[in-house]
Image (tube, rainbow, N blue to C red):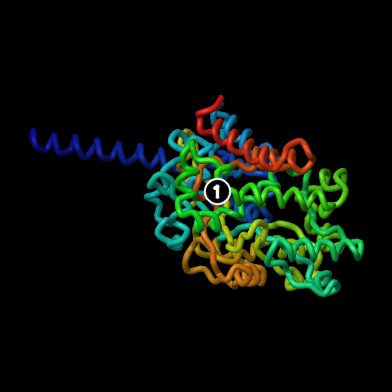
Amino acid sequence: MKKLFALLLCLSMLLVGAAALAEETQLRAGSTLVVCASQDWIKDYNRKLAEDFTAETGVNIDFQLIPDDQYGNVVKAKLASGDGVDIFFSNPGLGLSEYSPEKYAYDLSGQPWVSEYADWALESITYDGNVVFFAASSLDGWGILYNAELLEQIGMEPATSFEELLAICDALQEIDVTPIFEPGADTWHACVWLLETGDWLNRKYGDMYEKLCDPSGKFEDYPEVITFSEQMMELVERGYFGEEEDWLSQKWNDRAEAMASGEFGMMVCHMSAADQIEELYPEAGVENWPLTIIPLAGNNTFSNSGGSMGMVLNKESDMIPEALAYFEFLARQENLQYVYDESKMPIITFKNVEQDVTYQYETLMASCDNVSGPDYTTRIPFYSADPIGRAYIEMWIGDKTPLEAVQQIDKDRAIMFGVVE
């Protein structure tokens, strides 16, 4: 009888534990997952899938959109205050460093969808040995997008050197076209120019990324970074952005209209920008927009983001079961296929999804002879868009020399490392 009683007691405890676990992991209909994102990151297809998830589970998705140039600071403040952030976006790999990942990043390594990632994507969604990102995104990066009709009009091809870029800009000015659309009102955008030197310089120096992972590592130590910054300044001094009062008020969200108008000859953008132009202005034609590397200072490779922005689950959230269910929903084959069909991204993070290589990906890879590798955001901590962009805006308007801008970037990174107050 004692053995029977002990057995029944054990079974009872197991049943109670199972019931408690079921209750703990049951999704709470009517609850709301708060997802923090920059204002340009949530697309119509993201909203459609969020609505479908709510219809299936009863859990709402609240996309809290933050201005681009404030995103990092606002999210860090919200996390520190416990202000209801369940999921937030971050650059992949070491780009997560500025958000205190040891404290806030939930370990997703055991989730079933992790095994479905392509091998190249696994490195980007991992931090300190753990998978901490859900990234249903694409290999991406930045290059110069040209208006091919204007290039034909001046009888030139996309530039493969800084000297060729200057010649194109001069020819465009002669036909009353502003050579370069630069959205100066969105400070962060200035940082993506230098971002494209990462793979090139790390191949040249071998240990550059390793050194920049340490507080003692400085961009100033690399003469090519200074040259690159000087050439960025020369573009402004030659008037290739147009009048200062104009380019400083231009916005990233106006890029499609600006380029489709024929008023500008080129812009620095990511790979899907041409699709956005075609969506708003179908007559423009996606193949009218070749994308190539940024050839300043001798740069001749393509630095990629290794999976672009990813979602991170705040491990201090009280909505962890709902967040995990949301990631599982997004990772379903039909939902991934929907995202890629709608976004037209070129090289996707998940396996077994049908994809077509875009025209812009083809022209970009041809311009660098298919030589590509991870950019700074993936491989070093604290390549933060806002302070880097701000340093370059200050350079462009004459408040800093190119050397001073690079020194400011190094100082800001030292502050984030915690070695300078």
Q: Position of residue 130 (x, y in %)?
A: 39, 47
Where, by quadrant of the figure, is residue 167 drawn?
A: bottom right
Nearest the camera: 376 or 316?
Answer: 376
Q: Residue at x 76, y 51 (%)?
A: 234
Nearest the camera: 197 or 28?
Answer: 197
Where, by quadrant of the figure, is residue 16 drawn?
A: top left
> Quick check: 413 left or right of 240?
left
Q: Is residue 183 above or below residue 357?
A: above
Q: Position of residue 254 (x, y in %)?
A: 80, 52
Q: Is residue 398 above or below residue 341?
A: above
Amino acid tagged 1? Thr
Residue 282 visible in rendering: yes
Quickly name the residue at label 1.
Answer: 377
Q: Quadrant of the C terminus?
A: top right
Q: Residue at x 48, y 49 (%)?
A: 209
Nearest the camera: 349 or 42?
Answer: 349
Q: Residue at x 58, y 37 (%)?
A: 410
Q: Quadrant of the N terminus?
A: top left
Residue 30 visible in rendering: no
> Quick check: 196 left or right of 113?
right
Q: Position of residue 403 (x, y in %)?
A: 66, 41
> Quick check: 398 left or right of 32?
right
Q: Determine the secondary structure under disc 1.
A: helix
Residue lying at the far front in this picture: please name it: 223
Nearest the camera: 402 or 63?
Answer: 402
